[in-house]
Image (tube, helix red, strand yellow):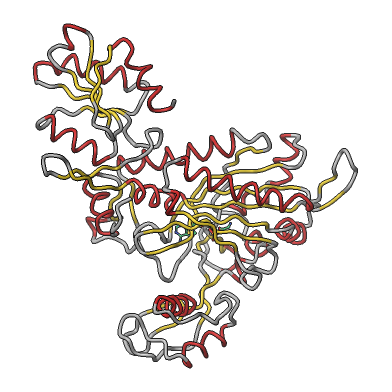
């Protein structure tokens, strides 16, 4: 990662190279909505596949699921989202901008800490609405936009997007876009356990879209209203939950390092007892050092038996489990590692971005993705127009095995730079000798070392390099 990386550099590279575009751009955009371009979708799919391979395929207790986005609204009553999934909204009376009261306080405390003033407030999350209002007034916390301190009282703003099923738009037909994928997993606990004849522990994993009407979205794809989550609900015996929490806390961290996120830009943050939600026995955030500061990337929580107990109560279904060996019946505890695909992608982009000074005084921008995560694995570059037919055939052959690009425009140096900037780990140059000796030159993105490789052995050579 570049030391002084800022979001503008990342956003601009993403737009220019086709990773991420502003949503609905030709209509002037839609605030904080983003579209993934040709490279963005490849990168996103590679991250999702890596997660699936690691947490579904390689974990003997785990299976996958793909549940509906629109669910029976009772699900969200049981989970507490209808009554409690809200942010404390506050308006500035002077400039009429809208803010989250908890974020205003956190930001103010953070700035004081930076100025060397010790923070004596336990946890902002644990503050009541009145405590937040009083705190803002007493400390004269200013509006970040106009610097006045004149705010309306706090109002609770529910973050779920509402819509209607069928033709009548009334309360009886109200449904919600899911605010997390977890709900679909909890309601399918019994189905999955019965159908797979699994004994506990058992993890159910799901990747899918989630929607939250965030008051203060921002920082590019860090906080958006439509995003994707990769969640696991790991159902286990109550006594074993702390061990599984510890296991997944480390497994998630190791996974991030394995996909190429810089270890120095990652840290664990265990929630203090005051910060924990009432049903959680332990929660750890894995935070990443984004260009705008440390922020949550992955949350790993021991949610006790709260979710299954609530769904059992609201649905009337028995969601307990009887251990076939001990005959003990209990409501399973749940360990939940939950991560946003978009945040993981942002951390991957930031970690990969570097600018290098070259010997000739020039600079090159390199996206140093791990080869298995890179959106394009191989670029095939013919050295001359006359070689295009042969080179294109080689590209078509390689493309059956790896995501490849074929580029004929500009000098070979310019083509290498373009591939460096999108993070392609290997460039294969087809030259005049290739047609005669059956070899091509393979250039390594990071070392820039070039090696002559037989075309007949190229597929295996690249496979070892990328996945070996
Ligand atoms: N089921 C638990 C749950 O949803 P969360 O902390 O609200 O917990 C989990 O969300 C993860 O989803 C976060 O760690 C983050 O990576 C991602 N996430 C949450 N809100 C997001 C948003 N508005 N935009 C992008 N990613 C978000």
Measured along the vertical axis of the image, is residue 127 above or below residue 380? below
Q: Nearer the viewer, residue 8 or 272?
A: 272
Measured along the vertical axis of the image, is residue 228 above or below residue 277? above
Measured along the vertical axis of the image, is residue 386 above or below residue 124? above
Q: Residue at x 42, y 91 (%)?
A: 140
Q: Position of residue 378 (x, y in %)?
A: 29, 28
Q: Quadrant of residue 46?
A: top left
Q: Quadrant of residue 226?
A: bottom left
Res 28 visible? yes
Q: Residue at x 54, y 72 (%)?
A: 86
Which quadrant, please, contains the C terminus?
Answer: top left
Q: Nearer the viewer, residue 141 or 157?
A: 141
Q: Position of residue 420 (x, y in %)?
A: 24, 38
Among all residues in the image, which is located at the extreme right?
Answer: 327
Q: Residue at x 83, y 52 (%)?
A: 330
Q: Position of residue 355 (x, y in %)?
A: 23, 47
Q: Position of residue 294 (x, y in %)?
A: 43, 62
Please indicate whether residue 59 sits to the left or right of residue 427 in the image: right
Q: Nearer the viewer, residue 183 or 105?
A: 105
Q: Residue at x 47, y 80 (%)?
A: 105
Res 165 visible? no
Among all residues in the image, which is located at the extreme top?
Answer: 436
Q: How many marks?
A: 0
């Amino acid at each position: 990662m570049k030391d002084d990386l800022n979001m503008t550099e990342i956003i601009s590279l993403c737009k220019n190279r086709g990773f991420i575009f502003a949503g609905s751009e030709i209509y002037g955009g839609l605030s904080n909505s983003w579209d993934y371009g040709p490279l963005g979708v490849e990168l996103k799919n590679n991250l999702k596949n890596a997660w699936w391979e690691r947490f579904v395929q390689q974990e003997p207790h785990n299976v996958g699921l793909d549940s509906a986005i629109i669910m029976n609204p009772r699900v969200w009553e049981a989970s507490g989202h209808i009554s409690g999934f809200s942010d404390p909204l506050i308006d500035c009376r002077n400039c009429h901008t809208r803010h989250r009261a908890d974020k205003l306080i956190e930001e103010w405390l953070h700035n004081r800490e930076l100025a060397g003033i010790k923070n004596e407030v336990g946890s902002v999350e644990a503050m009541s609405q009145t405590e937040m209002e009083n705190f803002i007034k007493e400390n004269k916390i200013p509006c970040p936009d106009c610097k006045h301190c004149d705010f309306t009282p706090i109002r609770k703003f529910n973050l779920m997007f509402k819509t209607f099923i069928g033709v009548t738009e009334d309360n009886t037909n109200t449904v919600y876009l899911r605010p997390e994928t977890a709900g679909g997993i909890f309601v399918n606990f019994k189905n999955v356990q019965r159908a797979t004849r699994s004994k506990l522990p058992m993890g159910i994993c799901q990747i899918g879209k989630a929607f939250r009407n965030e008051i203060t979205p921002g920082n590019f794809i860090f906080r958006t209203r439509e995003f994707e989550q990769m969640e696991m609900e790991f159902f286990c015996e109550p006594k074993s939950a702390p061990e599984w929490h510890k296991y997944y806390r480390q497994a998630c961290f190791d996974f991030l390092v394995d996909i190429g996120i810089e270890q120095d830009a990652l840290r664990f943050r265990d929630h203090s007892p005051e910060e924990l939600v009432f049903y959680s026995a332990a929660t750890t955030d894995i935070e990443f050092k984004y260009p705008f500061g440390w922020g949550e990337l992955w949350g790993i929580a021991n949610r006790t038996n709260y979710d299954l107990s609530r769904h059992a109560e609201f649905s009337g279904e028995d969601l307990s489990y009887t251990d076939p060996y001990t005959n003990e019946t209990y409501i399973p505890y749940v360990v939940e590692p939950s991560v946003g695909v978009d945040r993981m992608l942002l951390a991957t982009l930031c970690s990969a971005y570097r600018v290098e000074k070259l010997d000739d005084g020039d600079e090159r921008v390199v996206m140093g993705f791990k080869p298995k995560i890179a959106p394009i694995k191989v670029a095939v570059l013919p050295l001359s127009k006359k070689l295009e037919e042969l080179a294109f055939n080689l590209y078509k052959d390689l493309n059956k095995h790896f995501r490849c690009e074929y580029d004929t425009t500009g000098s070979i140096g310019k083509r290498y730079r373009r591939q460096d900037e999108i993070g392609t780990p290997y460039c294969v140059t087809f030259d005049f000798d290739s047609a005669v000796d059956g070899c091509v030159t393979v250039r390594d993105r990071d070392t820039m070392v070039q090696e002559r490789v037989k075309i007949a052995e190229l597929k295996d050579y690249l496979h070892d390099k990328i996945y070996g």
